[in-house]
Image (cartoon, grey):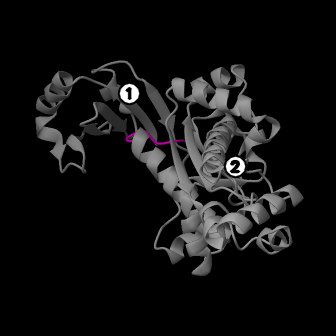
Amino acid sequence: MPQIVLKLPNTKINEMKKFYHSYLKSSPPGAIFAAKTANSSITAYKSGKVLFQGKAPELDAKRWGSETNVVTKKTGTSKPAHGYAPADSLFSSSHIGSDEAGTGDYFGPITVAAAFVTREQIGELKSIGVTDSKNLNDPTIKSLAKKIVALNIPYSLAVLHNQKYNRLQQKGWTQGKMKTILHHHAISKVLEKIAPMEPEGILIDQFSEPPSFIRHLQSEKRELQKNVYFMTKAESHSIAVATASIIARASFVKEMDKLSEQMGITIPKGASQKVDQVAGSILRKNGLTALDKCAKVHFANTKKAEKYQ
């Protein structure tokens, strides 16, 4: 179903409401009015965005202004025949990407970011160097994250700090479930930010099989959003996922810098012998309570750290 979104001043929206007086219907939350004509359903929001959708939304939209974004949704099933894998066309469309950082690191939180990139912004993001964050060093990631924010890319960031991570893990939550809820939260926030516009798809950098992802959501009474796809190494194909990966990684680096300052020692990334040695130093000086504040204590590194106390 084609969609057109216009950004209009309140004076114009009030004029529209009068014009469509005989077509008015009940309005959704956050809307000034909603109407249904022979060509389209029209919803005007307090944000100034007006959504036209239906068989011929352009016929109503052109009366009020020039379009700022057009979203054409596929008819039929929302998934390709092979399940939750995205069609190649998604990578050049206006879509949301979601990725995380910090999951394999003993120290530091898990950070998850989701970002909405329009097809018009893809080239610009590529031109400033947006790519898979795993191929970038920390100073480059910090610099790119600032440039992304300056471009007003709609994004949301979810950070699971170590103490809450450890409590959830003790309650029986797997890291997979934690990541699932974080991704869902970040994506939901981005969808709220861009409403009433809808992405042509949502791509998650895959860390578990889709049925497991869905089961984790259902266990917390949440549902998978519309048009969600999963793909391993998605950041190598989708600029939206690459953008999210940079935002997530930049946040993780920032959090690690904070932890180093708080602990009075440089906190290393990863899960190496160096990590064990630093964990041992923290244990010796401040005990397990201090580790609980800065590390994923169920990792094997905690046991290994004991010999460095």
| Camera-nearest residue between 40 and 203 | 203
Left or right: 68 in relation to 131: left
User: Mark 1 or mark 2: which comes first in sequence?
Assistant: 1
Q: Residue furthest right?
A: 273
User: Quarter of the image holding residue 79?
Assistant: bottom right
Q: Amino acid at mark 1?
A: Glu
* Alpha carbons under labels 1 and 2: distance apart: 28 Å
Amino acid on which disc 2 is placed: Pro
Numbered label attached to residue 86: 2
Closer to viewer: mark 1 or mark 2: 2
List x then y, in percent, for residue 11.
16, 22
What secondary structure is found at the residue carrying circle 2?
loop
Total marks shown come to: 2
- Tell me the magenta residue range: 195-202
Closer to the camera in the image, 88 or 270: 270
Reading the image, the residue beneath label 1 is: 58
Quarter of the figure with the C terminus: bottom right
Please name the residue shown 14% across and 25% down the image: 15
Mark 2 residue crowding within 10 angstroms, few (<14) / some (14–19) / many (20+): many
Report if residue 47 is visible in the image: yes
The kind of secondary structure the magenta stretch mainly shows is loop
Q: Is residue 141 magenta?
A: no
Residue sitting at x 49%, y 74%? 220
Q: Is residue 200 located in the magenta-colored stretch of the structure?
A: yes
Q: Is residue 231 above or below residue 236?
A: below
